[in-house]
Amino acid sequence: MPSTHKQVFRTGRGFTAAHFRCAKVPVPEPANGEVRIRVEAVGLELETGGSWPPWRDSTPGGQVVGTVDRIGPSTKSDLFGQRVAAWLPRGAWAEHACAAEP
């Protein structure tokens, strides 16, 4: 498993390529009660107003489909290696994302 992965960040309000950047950042580690998903597909919805999510340096996306590649500590899940779908508060536009176990 590599120690870094690609993740998309918003750089401002707007919906063109100029409002996003892709960066290599550390692969997230799942916390207690979470699983890590190797992302295969994401929803392309974007928030269009309000203060949530924070616009600058936030990672968009709430819908993710992928394969569970790591189980967090104290997580009672048998999902390792299983293909799953999850809803996240944000952060789906990345190669890996962490989600609460079902």
Image (cartoon, grey):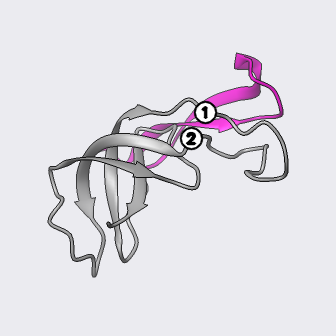
Q: Position of residue 51 (x, y in %)?
A: 84, 52
Mark 1 residue element: loop
- Could you tell whether 59 is left or right of 84 in the image? right
Give the residues drawn in magenta, as a range.
1-27
- Residue assigned mark 1: 45
Residue drawn at (77%, 35%) of the image: 11
Q: Disc 1 to disc 2, how far (Cα)?
A: 6 Å
Q: Which residue is more in the foreground, 14 or 70? A: 14
Q: Identify the image quadrant of residue 36.
A: bottom left
Mark 2 residue element: loop
Q: Earlier in the sequence, mark 1 or mark 2?
A: 1
The amino acid type of the residue labelled 1 equals Glu
Dot 2 surroundings within 10 Å: few (below 14), some, or many (20 or more)?
Answer: many
Residue drawn at (35%, 75%) of the image: 33
Residue drawn at (23%, 52%) of the image: 69
Q: Which residue is more in the foreground, 5 or 73? A: 73
